[in-house]
Every structure is written in structure tokens, then in C-alpha cells.
Image: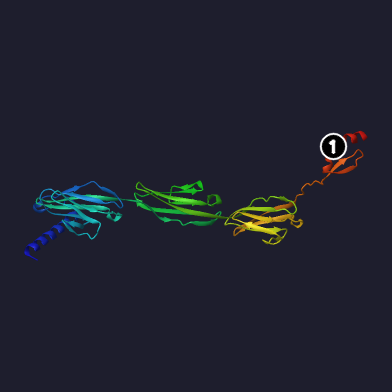
Amino acid sequence: MSVRGCLVAFSKFSFLLSLRILVLVPAGSVRSQGDAQSDNKVMDNITARQGETVSLRCEQGDVVTHTAWLNRSSILYAGEDKWSVDPRVSLVTLNQEEFTIQIEKVEMTDEGQYVCAVQTSRRPRTTSVYILVQVPPKIINLSKDLVVNEGSNVTLVCQASGKPEPAVSWKLISPTGDEGSDDEYLEIPSISRQRAGTYECSAVNEIDTDVQTVDITVNYAPTVLEGRDVGVTLGQRGVLECEADAVPEADFEWYKDDRRIVNGLDGLEIVSSASLSKLTFFNVSEGDYGNYTCVAINKLGSSSTNSLLYVVIEPTSSTLLQVQDGSGGAMALHSHSCLLLLALLPLLLLRY
């Protein structure tokens, strides 16, 4: 290296060393050569959202010999020389009027004070600015989906980060209800089946909103609706129904007296869905009439109901009509003789 190069390098080193001292020592206590007091200027804060690009501009003026941008005493740029290893930091403008650098995609770690230090032919000067980074809310801790038994105590937790600090709230969204909380915690004592559903946590600040949901499933024992009696004619098709409300879904069993009915035997079919079971008789016989019991069962308990399958006799053309005579006796007439009876009725009345 030439003598001139050594002098330039030494000059830069001396300037950077003086910059560190200038930044670290409180303003007003540092004096340049000749005991001239340095000029210190504070710019308005820069507020940026996370992910945005921030430009830091420093006015030069006078005859500038050296200039640098620093962050928390770490040198970002010394003139055109980049000292920062962060690829997001770059030089925008460097001339006699201004020295501007930019930081792309700012993060919370970029928040803090930045100082532009200038050495002029007269005296050193600093310009400082504070970058405030705003961060949209993000839910970082959320309760998992829950499956609980009816009557249990439930606590939901939702915690969020962000700047400004987000406001957190809970509400029941499906089915729509009044259940909610303006807090990170939602307490549901002795939960009932009506409070099962989807709960929404919202984290809100002036930048944005983050929303996530938690599903609560409440288990309870079956409740069976009262059975309905059904009348069926011999040889016809008949259906008994059994409807139950339960979580988890109930299993159904059918009984006649104390005997459990097996699906597919004796011309009977049992078809069950989530909440309904049907017992079908395809050809009702005399032995099918009687009382039937439906039992709905899940792991929390059981419930039952009774239904009666009874006989219905259809009227036919040979159905007899009973007509009382004057002596209290009865005459049996076929229904197809009604018209004849009506024609002879006056004569009968005259006779008696």
C-alpha cells in the first residue's frame, strides 16, 4: 500500500473512531478540534409497518470530508463503503446535498435510533432519527379443539403479539350466541350442550386483524322422543320410528317384550341413521302385534321409549248392520241391502 493509501485508511479509521465516541457520549459533551461544540439535530420519528421499506436521509451541506450512518453504534455505511452485512440495507444517494440509505422489509429488530454523523471542514455534526416499527397482530397461542362432557368447566385461551398491542376478544359464532369475552380467556363453567359450537378469537390493532377459531364438542347421554303407536292391517306394511338426540351419536336397539329383534329375521328390517331408527314390518302378521321398546345408547348412558303396533280392521261390503226391532230383537242385514231397508222402512213402522 502506498503512503497516500495508508494516510487515507488512517484518516477513515480515525473518523470512524470519533463517530463511535460522538454517538456514545451524550450530546453537548463532545468537542471537535479547536473545542468547537458539535451540532446535534433530532429528526421526527419514522413510523413504518413491518415489511415496508424505510429511507433514512441526511442533509450534507458545507464541505463534507467524511459521513456515516450508524445504528446503535454499529456502522451501516461509511461514505460509499458498506459495513453492514444485512442485504436489506443499501445506499440510495450520496452527494454534496444528501446521504440516504434504505432498509427493506423492516422488522421489529430494526426498531431503534439511527444516527447520521458528518465531519465537515468546520466541525462534526450528527442527525438522529428513531424508527418505530408497527407489527400486525398475530395469534401465537390458541386453545385446541375440545371434546368435553356436559357439565365440565371449560377455559379457552387466545394470546397474540403485535405492535401496538392488540386487543383480544372471544365470541360464539356458530350457532350464534351471546357467549363471549373481551379478554384473552373465556371461562365457561358447567358447559351445556347449547354452548357447543365454533368460538372465534379476534386480535385487533390499528394495523390489521387476525382471526382463528376453536370448536367445542359437548358429549351428552341420549334423549329419546316419546314413541308413537301405529295401527296396521293384517298383511300390510308397517313402520315404527324412534328418534334420539345424543353426542356422540346413539346406537339403537329394538325389543319386543324382553326379546331383542335381530335385523333381517322374521321379515323385519332395522335401518338407523344419526338420530333416527326405523323398524319396518313388510307383511304384518297376527304375531307382530304388540308392544315394542326402542333403546338409544352411547358411552354416557341410554334412554328408551315404547310404541304399540295394533291391528286395524278395514270395512268390507259384507259388514253387517244391526237394526233393532220393536221387541228389542236384532236383524242382521248386509250393507248392500241398505237401499232395500230404506224402501221397506215405512211398511215396517206401520206393522209395528
Residue 71 in view in this figure: no
- Tally of numbered discs: 1
Which residue is at the front of the view, 341 or 237?
A: 341
Residue furthest bottom in the image = 1
Position of the C terminus by quadrant: top right
- Expressed as whole percent of the image width and height from the top left, the position of residue 171 reads 47, 48
Q: Position of residue 237 (x, y in %)?
A: 70, 53
Where is residue 143, by image quadrant? bottom left
Q: Is residue 313 left or right of residue 121?
A: right
Q: Residue at horizontal 93%, vertical 35%?
A: 351
Residue 71 screen position, x and y as percent:
22, 55
Residue at 68% x, 55% y: name it: 280
Figure coloring: rainbow
The residue sitting at 20% across, 49% down in the picture is 57
Name the spot of residue 274 as percent of width and height, x first.
59, 55
Secondary structure of the residue carrying tag 1 is: helix
Amino acid type for the residue under numbered disc 1: Leu
Q: Nearer the viewer, residue 311 or 117?
A: 311
* Residue linked to disc 1: 342
Q: Is residue 158 left or right of residue 25?
A: right
Q: Is residue 285 left or right of residue 207?
A: right
Q: Is residue 300 visible?
A: yes
